Image: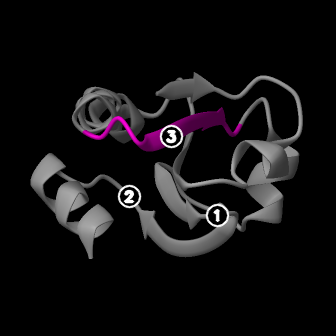
Amino acid sequence: MIIEFKNGNFNEEKKEGLVLVDFYATWCGPCKMMHPIIEEIGKENPNLKIIKIDVDQHEDLAREYGIMSIPTILLFRDGNLVKKNIGFIAKDQLTQWLNH
């Protein structure tokens, strides 16, 4: 399930289960390259919740999580940050990253 975060309580969105958060911007080339990869990962992992956050619209969240470069993906398990990846990552690498 992929959710475009608009408004609301981010802590509530990430509090249960495995949640991948994709910090991106619409003008970012590598972010555009990551989009289809993240969509595929979402289809292949139905228990993985994916939240996409546009850093230009949610500067507060980007600042809170120390996002200095995009794309940056964060992985939360039951609300706790467990992994962070900065920059483009190929699908096979992302799959490995998620599973280890």
Q: Position of residue 74 (x, y in %)?
A: 53, 60
Residue 95's spot in the image, x, y percent? 20, 56
Closer to the chain start, of discs 3 and 1, is 3
Q: Residue at x 18, y 66 (%)?
A: 96
In front here: 20 or 55? 20
User: Residues in magenta?
Assistant: 45-55
Q: Which mark is residue 78?
A: 1
Q: Earlier in the sequence, mark 2 or mark 3?
A: 3
> Dot 3: what SS?
strand
* Amino acid type, mark 2: Gly
**From mark 2 to mark 3, how far is it between C-alphas?**
20 Å
Q: Quadrant of residue 56?
A: top right
Task: Assess whether residue 85 is covered by the magenta stretch.
Answer: no
Image marks 2 and 3: residues in contact by CB distance under 8 Å: no
Q: What SS does tag 2 mark?
A: loop
Tell me if residue 47 comes above or below residue 14 in the rendering. above
Q: Are marks 1 and 2 in contact (CB under 8 Å)?
A: no
Observer-nearest of 81 and 88 = 81
Find disc 2 in the rendering and name its residue.
Answer: 87
**Residue 24, image x, y percentages:** 54, 39
Residue in view at x 70 percent, y 63 percent: 79
When asked about the image quadrant of residue 3, the answer is top right
Q: Considering the whole magenta stretch, tell me its main secondary structure.
A: strand
Q: Using the numbered discs, state the Cα–Cα distance from disc 1 to disc 2 in whole angstroms.
A: 24 Å
Q: How is the image coloured?
A: one colour
Q: Quick check: 24 above or below 18? A: above
Image quarter (top left, top right, bottom left or bottom right) of the C terminus? bottom left
Residue farthest left in this picture: 92
Disc 3 residue crowd, few under 14, some 14–19, many 20+, Cα 10 Å: many
Residue 31 or 20: which is nearer the viewer? 20
x and y percentages locating residue 61 in the rendered image: 80, 50
Q: Which residue is mark 3?
A: 49
